[in-house]
Amino acid sequence: MNDRSTNLKSIRPVIATALVNDNMSADECFQNATLRPIIKMQNHLLVMVFRNYIDKRKNVFYDLSLPKQLAYIENAIHKDMKFRNSVKGMIIGQFTVEEYELYIQNSSALNKRMMNIVKERLVSNIQVFTQPLAKAI
């Protein structure tokens, strides 16, 4: 394994519940071994990116009811291709070359898994999105 791969893997958090075993599909193994640790590691960045997404859309998110905020997150992740591709890039950029080679074999299914985990992360952080960030003057 080269230095980049070793370094990338060394900074990822360990997720005790993200198990990998022989009974799992290749996609589920990739999800637990690669996607979950990367997305957890990128959590703060994902939160800030979504805050920026809200800000760029005139902060309407903050005026929505909780169910509509959840739908807003869902829509951003699954329907806004520009935002979705930006998020995918933040995650794929943390892959090792070997992981990328596995990813491209079934990218469509893995993208669905990736976006669902990101959506779960944003929803679990919804309390962070209760008010706009104060602007520095």
Image (cartoon, helix red, strand yellow):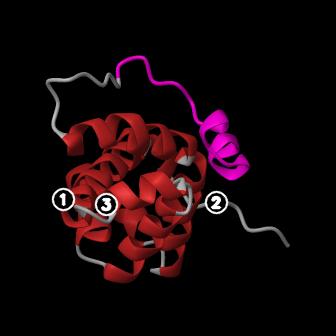
Q: What's the CA distance linking mark 2 and mark 3?
A: 18 Å
**Relative to 42, is 20 above or below?**
above
Q: What's the CA distance linking mark 3 and mark 1?
A: 20 Å
Task: Name the residue carrying label 3.
Answer: 73
**In the image, what residue type sits under mark 2?**
Leu
Residue toward you, 68 or 33: 33
Residue toward you, 124 or 78: 78
Element assignment for label 1: helix
In the image, residue 31 lies in the stretch drawn in magenta: no
**Relative to 37, is 105 above or below?**
below
Judge the density around disc 2: few (<14), some (14-19), many (≥20) Cα neighbours within 10 Å.
Answer: few
- Give how far across and how far down residue 26 sits, in percent: 21, 42
Element assignment for label 3: helix
Residue 52 relative to residue 112: left or right: right
**In the image, what residue type sits under mark 1?**
Ala
Residue toward you, 74 or 24: 24
Q: Which residues are magenta?
A: 1-17
Which residue is depicted at the point 66% across and 41% down? 6
- Give how far across and how far down residue 97 sits, in percent: 52, 58
- Number of disc labels: 3
- Which is nearer the N-term, disc 3 or disc 1? 3
Any part of residue 114 in sight: yes
Marker disc for residue 133:
2
Any part of residue 69 in sight: no
Task: Name the residue carrying label 1.
Answer: 109
Say which quarter of the image contains residue 19.
top left
**In the image, what residue type sits under mark 3?**
Ile
Element assignment for label 2: loop
Q: In this view, which residue lies farthest toward the right?
A: 137
